[in-house]
Every structure is written in C-alpha cells, then in structure tokens.
Amino acid sequence: MEKKRIRVSALLDSQMDFRKIAEVKKLKDEGQDLGKKPGSGGHNKKRTAEFLADLSDTIEASPTTSTRKQAKNLGVSKDTIRNAVQDLGLVSYVRIRRQLLSDASKETRVIKGKKLLTWMNHNGSTVRIFSDKKLWTVDQVRNSKNDRYLAYCIEEVPPSTPPSTQHRL
C-alpha cells in the first residue's frame, strides 16, 4: 500500500492531473488495455513520395501560390502542405519590393546626372530649387505580407516591382 502511495505522490509531483490518475486506475480495475487504440499513431499516409513529387511540380509551376490554396487544390490539410514544404527543404519568403531599373533607365540617369553636374559648374551663381514633390500612383494597393514565394534560398526570389503607371501633380 505504501508503494502505491509513493508512486501516486510521484505522479502528482510531476504535474500529472489527479483526474488522469483516477481514470487510469479505473481502466486498470476494469481490466481494460492501457495501450494505444489500434490504428492510432501510424506513419503518415498522405505525405508519400508521389505526393511530394506532385507538390514539388505544382510549386515549381507557380511558386507564388499560397499554401492554403495548394491544400485546397490537393484536398489535404494546410498543416500537411506546411510539413511537406518543410520536407522538400523549401522556405516561404516575403518578396522584397524594389524599383525596376532597366539598363536603359540606368544609362539615362547617368547622362542626366552628368548634364546636371556640368550645368551646376557653369551656373554656380544661379539658385536651383529641388522639390520633393511626391509621385502618386492610382494602381491597386497590395498587401506585401501576402506576396509570398516558395524557394530554397532568398537569392532565388525575384523582386516585387511597384506599378509602372505614375502621375505627377
């Protein structure tokens, strides 16, 4: 009897719930099995090699598709997709917004900058005022947190460019 009390005391000291102890005692007194139910805790039946290959192909086709939409298309839980993406070694990155500068626009910037410097050297007494007037856009606003990209490393993620239609005030 003393040994039982010591074991119960140790269970209570280890933060085991008293009701759980009573439930286990009741099952043992009734002669029921204390093991797991059959069929529980088996291997993962959804994340097979074939499933991972299909998922890899769909991600390769469109890496910007959200994991929720992929889960809906494949008919599995979003947790399964998240774990499968982790198995594939992919990471969901937020696309960084950068200004699109083509080679032609870089060249025109250099030319205009040189012209401005030569003009300022020749007309030093003239005061030139630079305005910080903002360019405003009319295009739809995007939530950048939702603009995700599945890739192996950050270098593979293409930049997200701002809209090209800008208007001056």
Image: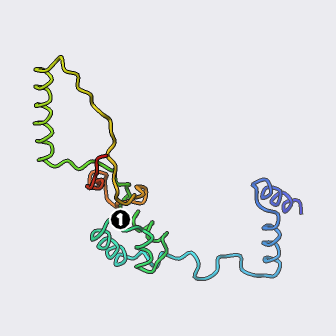
Up the image or down, 18 lies above or below 162; here it is below
Q: Name the image colouring.
A: rainbow
- Please tell me how crowded label 1 is: few (under 14), some (14-19), or many (20+) other residues with Cα within 10 Å: some
In this orientation, which residue lies closer to the viewer: 142 or 82? 142
Q: Quadrant of residue 66?
A: bottom left
Q: Amino acid at mark 1?
A: Leu
Query: Where's residue 104, x and y in %?
Result: 11, 47
Asked whether, in this view, residue 56 is left or right of residue 41, the answer is left
Asked whether, in this view, residue 62 is left or right of residue 105, the answer is right
Residue that badge 1 annotates: 88
User: Tag 1's secondary structure?
Assistant: helix
- Furthest-right residue in view? 1
Query: Where's residue 108, x and y in %?
Result: 12, 41
Asked whether, in this view, residue 115 is left or right of residue 28, the answer is left
Residue positioned 29% across, 56% down in the render: 163
Residue positioned 35% across, 75% down in the render: 49
In this orientation, which residue lies closer to the viewer: 62 or 103? 103
Up the image or down, 85 lies above or below 105; here it is below
- Furthest-top residue in view? 125
Asked whether, in this view, residue 50 is left or right of residue 113, the answer is right
Residue positioned 37% across, 58% down in the render: 91
In this orientation, which residue lies closer to the viewer: 2 or 105? 105
Quarter of the image where the N terminus is located: bottom right
Q: Quadrant of residue 124?
A: top left
Query: Where's residue 73, x and y in %?
Result: 40, 79
Count of numbered circles in the view? 1
Query: Where's residue 48, x and y in %?
Result: 39, 76
Residue positioned 45% across, 66% down in the render: 82
